Image (spheres, rainbow, N blue to C red):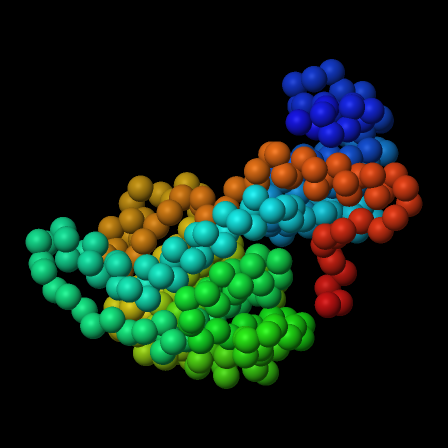
């Protein structure tokens, strides 16, 4: 696919005979520990996925731009998954799954979407796409972001000072935040206590956002009613982990969204062309900590 889009740019795989000093662009998920010595002329790193917290200054010098993967296929996949997860919690599907294992016929009253409040943490490309899809169902929508972001039809909250007000308006909370020092462990007992009693939780950010013991305690107390989790602190999730057998948790193996080679190739090549022309790269990660 890369050869079709950019036949003039040599595309090398790890097993190929690569001349390290000729490498200008690297697409990867994991960072080789000897990055700087292996590729002394490296100019740009492209993340193979949406996450970029693994590209720390200790591994990747600040002067080398890191570009996050923002491509239509990945955005569509995440939008599908979050829509499914919100609807599953909205329509009590985890309860019905648990009841099926007991052959228990227990209908529940349907609450109209117009009376269900859904909050999105993280109003980047993925969060905005999810919001546009959820609007079609008629949910009451709110969003929380580190920086100010105004979205039509959505009640927006900004920063730590407005976090509790945002949480109080969430019957279903969706975490789509990037992982950083500020957001690590943000899904904890203090946050759960600020949610309405019996709220639902969806985590499709990173496993590091969630304090797992606090979620289990919140489920036991009824503070959180059900949770759908796609990312975990340890992956694959260990076989003896309590999440696997918890009736109020749906576990999926980090499949909410996947980079689609066809569309990702076009996005990466377009960015390389911009760099070659001396134009600014798009979707560069701010690693300065200033915003």
115 up-or-down from 239: above or below? below
| Quarter of the rendering occupied by the C terminus | bottom right
Q: Residue at x 67, y 35 (%)?
A: 265
Query: Where on the picture, by quarter, is residue 255?
Result: top left
176 up-or-down from 191: above or below? above
133 up-or-down from 112: above or below? above
Query: Where on the picture, by quarter, is residue 31?
Result: top right
Q: Is residue 107 left or right of residue 224?
A: left
Q: Where's residue 117, x and y in %? A: 41, 75
Q: Residue at x 85, y 42 (%)?
A: 275
Q: Is residue 84 left or right of residue 270?
A: left
| Quarter of the rendering occupied by the N terminus | top right
Q: Residue at x 72, y 47 (%)?
A: 67
Q: Is residue 139 left or right of residue 29?
A: left
Q: Nearer the viewer, residue 130 or 99?
A: 130
Q: Residue at x 20, y 72 (%)?
A: 109
């Amino acid at each position: 696919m890369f050869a079709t889009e950019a036949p003039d740019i040599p595309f090398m795989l790890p097993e190929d005979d690569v001349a390290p000093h000729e490498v200008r662009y690297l697409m990867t998920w994991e960072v080789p520990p000897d990055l700087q010595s292996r590729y002394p002329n490296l100019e740009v790193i492209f993340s193979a996925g949406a996450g970029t917290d693994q590209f720390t200054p200790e591994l990747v010098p600040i002067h080398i731009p890191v570009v996050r993967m923002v491509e239509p296929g990945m955005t569509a996949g995440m939008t599908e998954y979050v829509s499914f997860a919100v609807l599953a919690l909205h329509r009590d599907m985890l309860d019905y799954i648990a009841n099926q294992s007991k052959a228990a016929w227990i209908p529940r009253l349907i609450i109209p979407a117009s009376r269900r409040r859904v909050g999105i943490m993280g109003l980047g490309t993925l969060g905005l796409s999810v919001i546009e899809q959820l609007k079609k169902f008629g949910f009451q929508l709110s969003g929380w972001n580190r920086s100010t972001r105004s979205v039509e039809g959505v009640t927006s909250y900004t920063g730590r000072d407005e976090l509790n007000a945002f949480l109080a308006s969430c019957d279903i909370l969706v975490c789509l935040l990037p992982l950083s020092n500020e957001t690590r462990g943000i899904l904890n007992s203090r946050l759960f206590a600020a949610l309405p009693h019996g709220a639902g939780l969806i985590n499709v950010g990173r496993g590091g956002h969630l304090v797992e013991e606090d979620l289990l305690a919140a489920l036991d107390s009824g503070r959180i009613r059900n949770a759908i989790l796609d990312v975990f602190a340890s992956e694959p999730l260990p076989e003896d982990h309590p999440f696997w057998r918890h009736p109020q948790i749906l576990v999926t193996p980090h499949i909410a969204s996947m980079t689609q080679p066809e569309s990702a190739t076009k996005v990466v090549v377009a960015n390389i062309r911009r760099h070659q022309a001396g134009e600014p790269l798009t979707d560069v990660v701010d690693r300065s900590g200033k915003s």
